[in-house]
Amino acid sequence: MDTRETESPEAEQPAAGGADVESAAGESGSPEKSAWFESMKVSGTLHSSYQFRSYDGRDDSDIYEYFSLRLRDIVKDRVDGAFSLFWHEDLNGGSTLKGSELYDPFLDIDQADSNRFRFYTGYLDFKQLGFEESRLRVGRQFLEDIDYAHFDGASYRFSPTDPLEITLFGGRPVTFYSSSSGDAFYGADVRYRFSPQTKAAARYYRYDADPFRDDLAAVEVWHMFMPELQTHAEFSLLDADPYLFQNDWYYRWDEYDFDIVAQVVRLFSEISDQTINFNPYFPVMHGYEPFTYGSTLFTKGLNDWVSLNAGFDFRVSDGGLDPVAEYTNRDYVRGTLGAEFYPTRQLTLSVNGEYWSVDSDDEFTGVSGEVEYKPTKQWTLTAGAEYGEYIQEYMDEFLLFFGQEEVFRITPDVITYYARVKWQPTSRIYTAARFEVEDNSLENDNWYAFQLQVGVNF
Amino acid sequence: MIQNRLSPLSWLIPLIWAVFLSGCDPKELANTFPHKPHIDQGVTCDVCHEMQDNQVTNPTLETCLTCHTLDEDRYQKCQDCHNQTSVEWNEQSLITHEKMLRPFLPKDWEDISYKHGEHLKDYNHCVDCHKGVEQSTQISIENLPSMKTAMAVHEELGLSNDCEACHLELNSFTPPASHDSRWTETHGRMTEFTGTDSCLLCHQEETCQLCHATQKPRNHSNLWRLKTHGIQASFDRAKCMVCHRDDTCLVCHQASSPPVPPASYHTPDATCLSCHSPLAARGPKPRPKPSLYKPMPHRMMMGVTSQKCLECHLF
């Protein structure tokens, strides 16, 4: 995790340790040119990861690079910039298919994608345009307030008066693996802070992708009754019909060292052909039918060295879809239970369990345990194991061919052992190595993996 | 399995909370001191808040009595409040009101070490941090500086903005207490309340991408990657969307098609058997009528190319 002493971009603080970069223009002494780059501060992250995997006598080596760059005050108090990129490379190349295998056992999202670069962001911020508190962001960007939309275009955020903030945005959505040619995404977001405890937002946006055009409008409210009690609620319309309601609660009972996080989600409309591909309820696998989802998560500190946690969540669909869509809209209940022990400040032991039951008879049970030892601030040693068991039912189509609709139950399970060493010699540099062995009942051999990570925040 | 009749519970829970909370006004307890009339009368900050040992003090009862008299009504007012909070009231004690103010302070503030003397050039600058205090009619967290404000003031005064400048324990090696071993799973829910602004106090905007692009969740084992992720996607794919987008499925499945919309995945170069193997053969339930499909002895065909399938299954 990237922690550092830098602060919010909105605070317009220099990145701690960020290098001052003097431009040639600055050295020339020309007042016009010296405005550019003269006070620029550069910060960023370079994260490199090497992964080695071995299975059934074959191995695979990959490297992953993540690079982000933030340029503050390209023109002092006027222009900032940012850029981030992910790149991956399969060092082996080629297929490792063996015998009658139908797919490469090492195939994953990165390896299956011929495009080795993922260009995440690349934008310039022009500040104080029209309003003192404003910025025009042009380029590839995320809009974190709106479903974390990812698009190429422009967003203009301004504050005509202190507690009011308006954002106008528009552009073309970004998709890494498919074309978004001709698609469009645009809208507006208005936020008003009534008090330090209460904030509200209203927004509208539209997504165009032939042949669909969807309008979404939403209102959102945050309220802090007190630091220990907070709530958030959102209600939205999709194409003028009720779409989604979400309500979150956080409560801390200080006296008993007890935290509760609760959430209720209600999807009102059937989601079938909508275009909002960055929305969690986009119908990736058939449509979503209306459902109700609820969850609670409790954390209880028993004393200074033990804490317990428990969670429960469920999803209930309204029913009524065709059988194919129903299969991808299954109801479920899930429970989690965990404990953390801190016998000393350096040592943490945690145990977590999870169980879910999915309509009609599928199940999953998972248990994990981890020991973390931090002898110094710089070193973290971790070892752990995870066990998961799936129970799935299926009909054998061979028997079905002969008229026997017999249901078979399979129980693939997996156990993973891992050890990790993390070394953070300074607040800017971190390295980590992880070794793991995975044994699952559906494979001929164990999986072995080694990962080495090096990162620098500059 | 839970039934649809449980659905109303999801509405009852927030309703119960709302009713429960409607009578709760935590401000009431500390709603005792109005700064506004004092400042309107020309009382400057340092009259009540003297500087001692580099710290700004709170007024004593004696301080108040330099202007006020402790008549019966006023005494009763003090008593009313102290009775509510079970704080012993002593005429000779300092009026720090710490216990009453405590509920207004975020828990993380316990980690703050702060000396006013290092920050104040003179008392005219109080409102730079305590914004709106001159208009306040009650003691409130609204008039305390946020971390963002504090950092801006630090920069203005040329003071360090390193974590250690204010925090006793928290620094780039020691994250906040909330960042426990389950934080990787729970941080998304907490940002529902805080937004990303509070994250950006320590992290950068790109930090989200760094992890979400390079760190897989623990449950993404090889078994998950190759066999079982589709099960979860059949009931809880909203979680997939935290890192993935709808076209992510295509990346692998355009070469090995899952039983999902044919228009998307049953492309001519799809490999049928990698998905339509016994593990994935259960399909929709209830299954379509036999007359709607032509069952094949698929198991006998394991190992053959998908061209064999295409003899019967046309895209």
Image: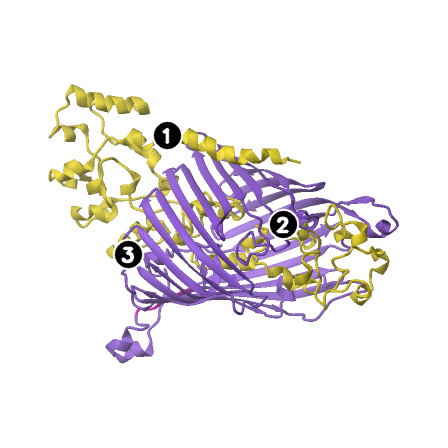
Chain colours: A purple, B yellow
In this figure, which residue is indicated by the disc labeled 3?
A: A160
Residue A405, given in percent of the width and then of the height, sits at 83, 45
- Disc 2: host chain: B
Identify the residue at image location x=77%, y=52%.
B281
Look at label 1 and name its amino acid: Cys
Is residue B172 visible to us here?
Answer: yes
- Quick one: label 2 or label 1, which is nearer the N terminus? 1
Q: Is residue A278 above or below residue B116?
A: below
Q: Is residue B196 above or below residue A369?
A: below
Quarter of the image where one finds residue A146: bottom left
Q: Nearer the viewer, residue A386 or A83?
A: A83
Disc 3 versus disc 1: distance between alpha carbons? 34 Å
A53 displayed left or right of B140: right
- Disc 1: host chain: B
Q: Is residue A340 above or below residue A443?
A: above
Look at label 2 and name its amino acid: Asn
Residue furthest out toward the bottom: A28
Look at label 3 and name its amino acid: Pro
Co-location on one chain, circles 2 and 1: yes
Identify the residue at image location x=29%, y=21%.
B83
B12 displayed left or right of A22: right
Residue furthest out toward the top: B72
Is residue A41 a member of the stretch shown in magenta?
yes
- Disc 3: host chain: A
Identify the residue at image location x=74%, y=53%.
B280
Highlighted range, magenta: A39-43
